[in-house]
Amino acid sequence: MIITIYLTSGVAVLLLVVDNKATVTYVQLLKEDLVIMRLVPNEGPVPEFRAGQFITLGMPNPNEGGKIVRRAYSIASHPENRDYIELVIRWVRKPLPGRLTTQLFNAKEGDEVLWLKPSGKALEINETMPDGSPDTRRMVCIGGGTGLAPFVSYAQHLHHVGDKREIVVLHGASYVDELSYKDLLTDLEYDSIQRGKDKWNFRYRAAISRPQEWFNRSWSGQTGRVETFLRPRADGASPLEDLVGEEITKENTIFYVCGWQGTIDGVMDFLKPGGFVTEHDKRSDGSFEVKYESYG
Ligand SMILES: Cc1cc2nc3c(=O)[nH]c(=O)nc-3n(C[C@H](O)[C@H](O)[C@H](O)COP(=O)(O)OP(=O)(O)OC[C@H]3O[C@@H](n4cnc5c(N)ncnc54)[C@H](O)[C@@H]3O)c2cc1C
Ligand SMILES: NC(=O)c1ccc[n+]([C@@H]2O[C@H](COP(=O)([O-])OP(=O)(O)OC[C@H]3O[C@@H](n4cnc5c(N)ncnc54)[C@H](OP(=O)(O)O)[C@@H]3O)[C@@H](O)[C@H]2O)c1
């Protein structure tokens, strides 16, 4: 693909974007419109990336004369997994079938997709404070729907490297069968309980936003959208604070949020009164307590 960019001088520069090819090696349909998919590059190793980044996939669209439609997908596997790239993808159905997701949901194991190398800085794990000291704050990761993907990558990566920070992953979904990584994240929490928090300090909780629906009748956990984990109860403490056992402050916690803009806004409604600011609005000294990526 050739992209034309215009410099401020008016000079046009042609950039050549090279699509790589990968093979779909695993398709796990969680439900009609939610899939976990693995890809292996046809040539060369699994590309290098950092936890929290996304990869751009492309497929020719037969309804558009074979034109390649490209979209970004957060990587759910971790950088140390050199066997495949894993993604969790929602089929967009309404108001019109999504141009790429409809193609991806037609793909079978053995089919080919195009990809551009992983990128994105918004959800890179923060490692240092503005003064250069290590960031040792508790990490609270809030994923709405498929917005959980970057935090599945975080959890596996941080577990792999033996990170000692306290990590809490909160997932919000409409239905219990959309808790896409419940097994993996529950196992990571068991490992924390068994080995001790000094070795691996990890917790996972989920919220179901449509608890009244019959399909969700077995759900006994948090109800409401995922940001309700931050809503203070009558005694002043939030469910998240009950979970971690102390008041959440901008000094002790950094938040990572991925999902609908409404989820980001809902989280900030609870955090702003406590003085939390996002990386986008960081203070003049470079400090911030929230990183996010929104679906727009
Ligand atoms: C950084 C980043 C990471 C992402 N990670 C993930 C991920 O991990 N998993 C995931 O599932 N998604 C992810 N996405 C979303 C993904 O990139 C796509 O936007 C999504 O899959 C929809 O693509 P599509 O081509 O199928 O839909 P599109 O065809 O682009 O449609 C988008 C919306 O517009 C509507 N629409 C399309 N055409 C029309 C029309 N003519 N008139 C009216 N409405 C129309 C569609 O119904 C749909 O609601 C990510 C996005 C970003 C930016
Ligand atoms: N990084 C990214 O940009 C990114 C990553 C992943 C996915 N996406 C795209 O985002 C779209 C939907 O994602 P999804 O299907 O995973 O989400 P979803 O399953 O529709 O929703 C997940 C949760 O978010 C809640 N929610 C829905 N709309 C909301 C809003 N406006 N504000 C706050 N909360 C809201 C839902 O609550 P209710 O039950 O009340 O609806 C549910 O609890 C897809 O098209 C996907 O391609 C983008």
Image: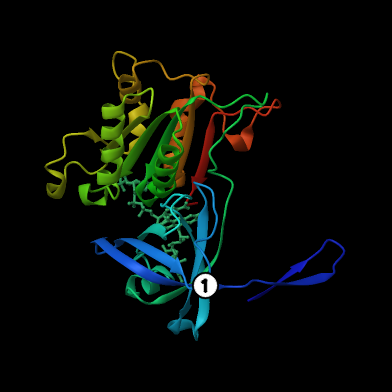
SS label for mark 1: loop
105 vs 164, left or right, is left
Q: Does the residue labelled 1 lie within 8 Å of ligand 1?
A: no
Residue flagged by tag 1: what amino acid is it? Glu
Name the residue tied to disc 1: 43
> In the rendering, at what x and y percent does residue 143 appear?
39, 42
User: Is residue 88 among what the camera can see?
Assistant: yes
Q: Which of 202 and 280 is in front in this view?
A: 202
Say which residue appears at 12% left-offset and 48% top-offset. 214
Say which residue appears at 40% left-offset and 43% top-offset. 156
266 vs 6, left or right, is left
Q: Quadrant of residue 218?
A: top left
Q: Image height check: is 171 above or below 167?
A: below
Seen as rendered, the residue at the extreme bottom is 65
Q: Nearer the viewer, residue 125 or 7?
A: 125
> In the rendering, at what x and y percent does residue 50 appear?
54, 48
Say which residue appears at 35% left-offset and 76% top-offset. 110
